[in-house]
Image (spheres, rainbow, N blue to C red):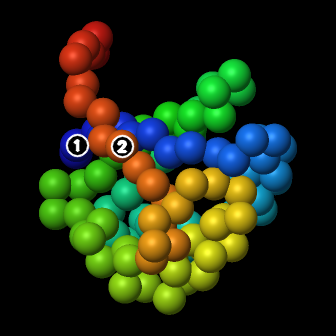
Amino acid sequence: MEQIAFTMRLNPGQAGEYERRHDTIWQELVTLLKAVGISDYSIFLDEDSGILFAVLRRHENHRMGELPGQEVMRRWWQYMADIMATNDDGSPQTSSLRRVFHLP
């Protein structure tokens, strides 16, 4: 199992709405994320900067690369596009983070 981390950015004043939408995340999206090999997925917010910090575990043979082609994923991105920074295809703008320390 591999652990990865990345950041995303909320638009100003959208923290509450972002949390509300995730409190009612669609079950079909949860099912898809698990089906492609994602587990133990958490997102944290730096309230001062609006930066979201995400960390997840994925199986060695994960299929995360399939997510952009999935209709439910594209719908979720469209649903979230008004409250966060996105790419032209609607996906969230992300920055990968490199692990520099780990205490098992």
- When the figure is inspected, residue 19 is found, relative to residue 103, above or below; the finding is below
Q: Quadrant of residue 78?
A: bottom right
Q: Position of residue 48 (x, y in %)?
A: 69, 22
| Side of 32 where 99 appears, left or right | left
> Is disc 2 placed on a helix, strand or loop?
strand
Say which label, 1 or 2, has the lower sequence index: 1
The answer to whether marks 1 and 2 mark residues whose Cβ atoms lie closer than 8 Å is: no
Question: Which of label 1 and label 2 is nearer to you?
Answer: 2
Identify the residue at image location x=22%, y=17%: 100
Name the residue carrying label 1: 2
Amino acid residing under circle 1: Glu
Q: Position of residue 81 (x, y in %)?
A: 64, 66
Identify the residue at image location x=57%, y=71%: 77
Residue 38 visible in this rendered orientation of the protein: yes
- The numbered mark at residue 16 is none
Q: Position of residue 88 (x, y in %)?
A: 46, 73
* Front residue of 22 and 82: 82
Q: Position of residue 85 (x, y in %)?
A: 57, 54
> Label 1: how many residues lie within 10 Å, few (<14), some (14-19) or many (20+)?
few
| Side of 76 where 91 appears, left or right | left
Name the residue carrying label 2: 95
